[in-house]
Image (cartoon, helix red, strand yellow):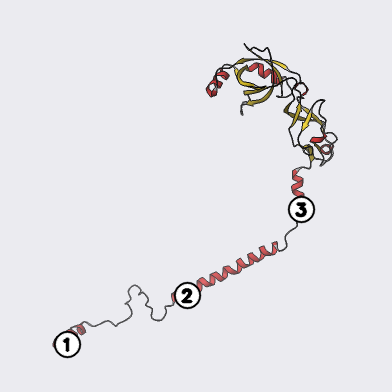
Amino acid sequence: MKSVSLNVYPRSRTRRAGARSVRQAGRIPAVVYGWQRQPQNLEIVAKDLENLILHSVSENLLVDLSVKDDARAKRLALVQEVQHHPLSGKVLHVDFHEVAEDEKVTVLVPVETTGEAVGVKTGGGVLEHVMFRVKARALPKDLPEVITLDVSHLEMNKAIHLGEIKPPPGVEILGDKNLSVVAVAAPRAEEEVAAVEEAPLAAGDVEMIKEKKEEEGEEAPARAGEKAVKGAEKAVPKAGERTAPKAGEKAPGKAAEKPGEKKAERSAEKKK
């Protein structure tokens, strides 16, 4: 990977308020760390960084930092992380990792594909990116900006594994060699239809539904009959029970006493 020059400036304004004021001034807050030195806060002219990223294959960059008023003329560093605004996409912050020219470093390298897979072109398959970045180890000058894989030979249900990648000279690909990086698979819609067609129908499913409906149909008239019987039982009074009299009727029981009978009973009691 070829290094590119980038002018940066020391930054005294820190925390959220300081970073906001740096961005308002047309600069991007940054930090550089590593190589047995204390982290240093920096700021970069926004246009300089945007032009650098625009003319690069990826954000995996090796830069020669020229810090203003620094004792060293240049500091070799890798762009470790670039933070973007989730909506506008503007760069919010940059992390630089200072490295030595003669020391191997480990970075994540983006993976791209070239060609049209046979399984996609003739078999109707879909090319799936299982891994978008792979871990590589090398000297800073040997690090690739991107790893390109030719997928034109891939047939249906075939994949390129991590161990099958041929890295550039001086580069070592790290990780499980059996992991798939890209693969050609059948469309998911066809897989779902095939799974539904192959799934056997459980014995008794239809009969159980039918019996349930029949039981529900038999229970309905039975319940209606029970209600009718209960209504009839309520209408017929049991022995010893009294029924409420209707309007205009006298309550059942004793016969109506005549007016003279009450006076005769009272006089008889007085005589006694």
Residue kind at label 3, given as amino acid type: Glu
Residue kind at label 1, given as amino acid type: Ala
Residue 43 in picture, x, y percent from top left: 61, 17
Residue 116 against residue 238 in the figure, above or below: above
Say which label, 1 or 2, has the lower sequence index.
2
Q: Is residue 46 left or right of residue 4?
A: left
Residue at the far bottom: name it: 272
Say which label, 1 or 3, has the lower sequence index.
3
Say which label, 3 or 2, has the lower sequence index.
3
Res 116 → quadrant: top right
Residue beneath disc 1: 268
CA distance separating discs 3 and 2:
56 Å
Q: Is residue 170 left or right of residue 70?
A: right
Residue 5 visible in this rendered orientation of the protein:
yes
Q: Determine whether the residue tagged by mark 2 lies in a helix, strand or loop.
A: helix
In front here: 261 or 45?
45
Residue beneath disc 2: 232
Res 55 → quadrant: top right
Residue beneath disc 3: 197
Residue 94 in picture, x, y percent from top left: 64, 23
Which quadrant would the C terminus be assigned to in this image? bottom left
